[in-house]
Image: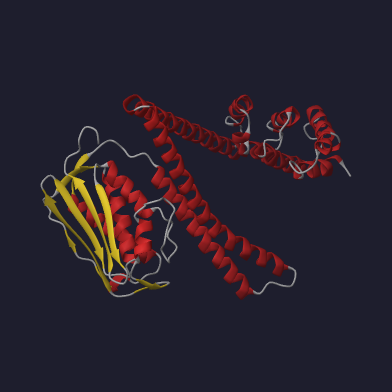
Amino acid sequence: MNCWKAVKKRLSNAGKGTPTEMSTYGRQDVTDLLTKLQANPEAIEWRERRELARSLSDLLRDGKQTDDDLHLVAVLADDPKWEVRREISELLTLLPDDDFTHAAAKLSEDTNNFVRKAAERALDRRRKGQRAAKHRRHGIQEVAAEFDEMERLHGTLAAKMARRISERLYDVSVGACVHNLRGVLTPIKTSTTKLLSELDGGLDAERASKHLTRIDEKVAFLERLLDDMRTYSQPIPHERRREKLNDLVRDAMSIAVENLRDKGYETSVLKLPVDVPHDITLEAARHQIVVAVTNVAKNAIESLVVDEGRLRAGTVSICAKLVGDRIELAVEDDGDGMSAEDLEEIREFVPGQTTKKQEGTGFGLPTAKKYIEAHGGEMGIDSRDGEGTCVTIILPTEQTECES
């Protein structure tokens, strides 16, 4: 077995083999390659050098790299072939800070445009990752500061109880999300396994199409779930502007209807009356209120789904009135409604938890409630099996200092 095949074997088994296997035969081979390339950058054929760079990417991703591996990265970053240097540019974000700084500085000024562009993309990913990590740290620090403030105001016992409640809610939310994710990954795995098993015997086009369609649908759902999780976790801006409620509601209804049309539903069978006086205004973060009403309206319309791609004739109405300095907004449908048991579960507003027959992510209503409460409002839901559902949103027209 030549040295390159030994490296491929060692790299492909990274994390699988025993420490002895990784530190003798395979490791010595990497050292030999490094020595050869340091003496002559073209000691092995350039395509093999490119494959070596790609394999190093897998190794770095697994966190199994040694000093020799990092020295190989540095050597290949100076490779005579731009194709090899581009592969190194693609793995820059996997390098430790010092190695990243040195390699990125070199490759971002490379004479080849493809190498430079790849290095610039890596730099952008690195910066975005650093910003995201900073936001996460900041978020954790804010939570810790809030617990400290609660302890100062209400005592250690109250702070400990609040921490236990938040941890329990976190556990329930994560459990619900894991359940949803498993529900997506299991059919993907099943369809993939069936496709692979049928390859040897000759793949039937119709059966392959069926499996691939199922995989595509589940991947699309997974994307929706991740998008909804990200939306739920986004911090709510403190800035508020005076907005017309009628404009917000009509934007929300339009988005909800368009969402159903994109999925192939014929929405002309729906009646969608909106009765929101034009003179009702409120201080709001526009995007969050639109998202909240959109999620509620979308749920209401989906209660009229008969089967995939088909809605039955029905009505989803939105009306609002001003009661003192508060707005009462009601979204009502004449859909299937919910049983008392399902209603009780929905009223918990646990992210990721869903009772819908359709593939809901379980984040729509919890996100709406979170955004409404961030504006000093309240959200409630009433429903009767077979008689429809009404979601009530109460919002202040003015934001208090605490809320804003």
- Spot the residue most to the front: 157
Give the residue drawn at x 82%, y 33%.
23
Q: How is the image coloured?
A: secondary structure
Q: Is residue 104 left or right of residue 236?
A: right
Quadrant position of the C terminus in the picture: top left
Q: Is residue 374 left or right of residue 31?
A: left
To which quarter of the image does residue 69 belong?
Answer: top right
Q: How many marks?
A: 0
Query: Where is residue 200 shown, x and y percent of the image?
Result: 75, 69
Whether 134 is drawn above or below 382: the answer is: above
To which quarter of the image does residue 338 belong?
Answer: bottom left
313 and 334: which one is in front?
334
Query: Where is residue 239 shown, x and y percent of the image?
Result: 26, 36
Query: Where is residue 268 shown, x and y percent of the image?
Result: 28, 72
Give the residue drawn at x 33%, y 60%.
298
Residue 9 in sight: yes
277 and 112: which one is in front?
277
Whether 149 is drawn above or below 311: the answer is: above
32 and 196: which one is in front?
196
Query: Where is residue 31 shown, x and y percent of the image?
Result: 81, 31
Residue 404 in sight: no
